[in-house]
Amino acid sequence: MDQATTQLSINRAAAQVLRWGFIVSAVLVIAGLVLTLARGDDLHTSLESLPSMIEEVLDGRGSGIVGIGILAMIATPIAATLAVIVACQRCGDRRYALITTGVLVILVISAGLSVL
């Protein structure tokens, strides 16, 4: 595989994950906001725990859906970075895969600290 094809493969992998992550998170946030407005409920000012969000979704509250949408937004760049690592491994670019793994570790730590 030549360098241009390798780069294109890596770019496509990242772009697909970013596109779908944005779509899913945007749909969840918008649906949660519409449901919250329709029910006249209040939104949280910070993220609740995942079990609390799931409970809110099961109770039909939009704030839980908004929270899950925000978590999807946070997870999207992490998933895209993982897709780049996989694409690099498939293309045989181990050095870039290793560098990107370091970036993934930083993203996971940052995301973990942000939801505490």
Image: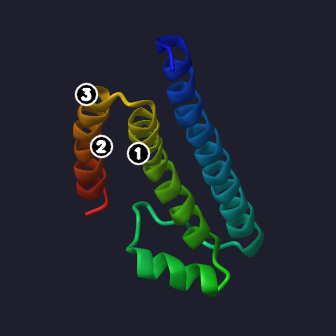
Earlier sequence position, callout 2 versus callout 3: 3
Label 1: few (<14), some or many (≥20) within 10 Å? Answer: many
Earlier sequence position, callout 2 versus callout 1: 1
| Residue topped by disc 1 | 82
Judged left or right of residue 8, residue 99 is: left
> Residue sitting at 38 percent across and 31 percent down?
92
In the foreground, 89 or 16 = 89
Earlier sequence position, callout 1 versus callout 3: 1
> Residue sitting at 47 percent across and 66 percent down?
44
Determine whether 67 is above or below 80 in the image: below
Label 2: few (<14), some or many (≥20) within 10 Å? Answer: many
- Real-space CA distance between mark 2 and mark 1, rounded to the nearest whole angstrom: 7 Å
Judged left or right of residue 68, residue 47 is: left
> Residue sitting at 22 percent across and 51 percent down?
109
Q: Position of residue 1 (x, y in %)?
A: 51, 21
Judged left or right of residue 50, residue 11 is: right
Which kind of residue does numbered mark 2 sit on? Leu
> Residue sitting at 68 percent across and 46 percent down?
23
Which kind of residue does numbered mark 1 sit on? Leu
| Label drawn at residue 104 | 2
Badge 2 vs badge 1, beta-carbon distance below 8 Å: yes
State the SS at label 2: helix
| Label drawn at residue 95 | 3
